[in-house]
Image (cartoon, rainbow, N blue to C red):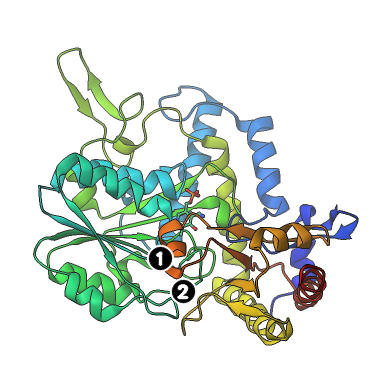
Amino acid sequence: MLDIDKIRAEFPILTQKIQKKDLVYFDNAATSQKPKSVLSALAHYYEAINSNVHRGAHTLAAAATEAFEQTRLLAQAFMNAEHLEEIIFTRGTTEGINLVAASYGRTVLRPKDEVLVSMLEHHSNIVPWQLACQATGAVLKVIPIHADGSLDQEAYRNLLSNRTKIVAFNHVSNALGTVNPVKDMIKEAQAVGAVVLVDGAQAAPHFRINVQDLNADFYVFSAHKVYGPTGFGVLYGKKKWLEQMPPYMGGGEMIKEVSFERTTYNVLPYKFEAGTPNIADAVAFAESLRFVQQHGLENIAKHENELHDYAMQLLPKVKGFRAIGTAAQKVGVISFLVANTHHFDLGMMLDAQGVAVRTGHHCTQPLMRHLGIEGTVRASFAVYNTKREVEVFVEALEKCVKMLT
Ligand code: PMP
């Protein structure tokens, strides 16, 4: 059992008053808050270790390199990657997908090849593939959804063919919270010879990720949604792909030898890590991984699911409440609308009562268009949230709705 009061005490930001009310932070799918251990690691890095990594002859350079590379080891264990060099540090999910789309995508795609993405995707798992398709003459196809927000698996199987070269979908939808059956979907894509990228931005905070068990070709996530700092993330890629892919960016760190005539590239993972990396945030992220490890992702997910179920018990009593996305497999997120109120008005009015939720299209405009809506209100949970906060949120929502209708 998790001691939520004790866990809350690790997050200084949660003690803040917003608009003179206790903060209820239900915008965790956008970014989670960070425990003290992460904040202290960041300060400690700059106070005691700061130096550039790799190639340094002096003590601080060695200490910075060691701390930086320690995170790679932890990330490898976190994802259960077979090889350490399969862990590439990025600025986040977006950069990870762009790297794969530009480096792998543009290399392998030929005119009329097909790239499949799903209706549930975040813009960052759509636009990089559009760019790759535009550059190569490949065609982007979309896996449709059922009315409850689950992916239409039959349509998916029908879309797969020997023209399908890349399939990219999220593990968990940020807009609806749908959990996709990624293991089966990966198997089906690979059966037609396609390579699969999984956008794990919304899964990493809730599930134990096992890239070997999933047999994912690429898997990406951002640190800032897993109790870690912004501007840092991880791309896992199977060694056999990463080895044959050209560099994404050129610069320092990613080279073996440079001349004006010809440059040779560094070994993995450094071939994909041009320039001085985000050392401080990488080092601090080790503490986030220790935090989830200490509390256990299974326990965290169980707690969040209880909050989700409790909220879904209470919310229907709000007149006009309509859940958007009701798939059987869901995690951490409740997207909704209330009667004919505008989602943005609801968000502003909830904020006036100290409740932070996200409103809008959640970077999923094609999905919103498909659903015939402009956006939703989204409440999303993390380990430090409580049932009492769910009650405060529902009471606040009732108040807003009364004022607006
Ligand atoms: N994919 C999904 C499913 C997301 O939820 C997000 C963040 N909202 C992203 C991609 C993009 O992540 P980032 O902005 O951290 O690169």
Q: Nearer the viewer, residue 228 or 123?
A: 123
Where is 271 relative to 7, above or below? above
Within 10 Å of disc 1 (Cα), the crowding (few <14, some 14-19, many 20+) is many
| CA–CA distance in space, label 1 to label 2 | 9 Å
Percent of width and height locating residue 307: 67, 78
Residue where numbered disc 1 is placed: 120
Quadrant of residue 23 in the image? bottom right
Residue 64, compared with residue 341, is above or below; it is above
Q: Nearer the viewer, residue 148 or 7?
A: 148
Coordinates of residue 222 in the picture (x, y in percent):
49, 52
| Residue 56 placement (x, y as % from top left) | 45, 24
Relative to 254, does residue 122 appear above or below in the rendering?
below
Q: Residue at x 71, y 44 (%)?
A: 40
Give the label on residue 178, or none: 2
**What residue is drawn where x is 49% and y is 31%?**
62
Relative horizontal placement of residue 389, taking residue 267 as reference (left or right): right
Query: What amino acid type is highlighted by mark number 2?
Result: Thr
**Amino acid at the residue labelled 1:** Leu
In this view, the residue farthest toward the top is 260
Mark 1 and mark 2 residues within 8 Å of each other at the beta carbon: yes
Identified at 74% across, 66% down, the residue is 7
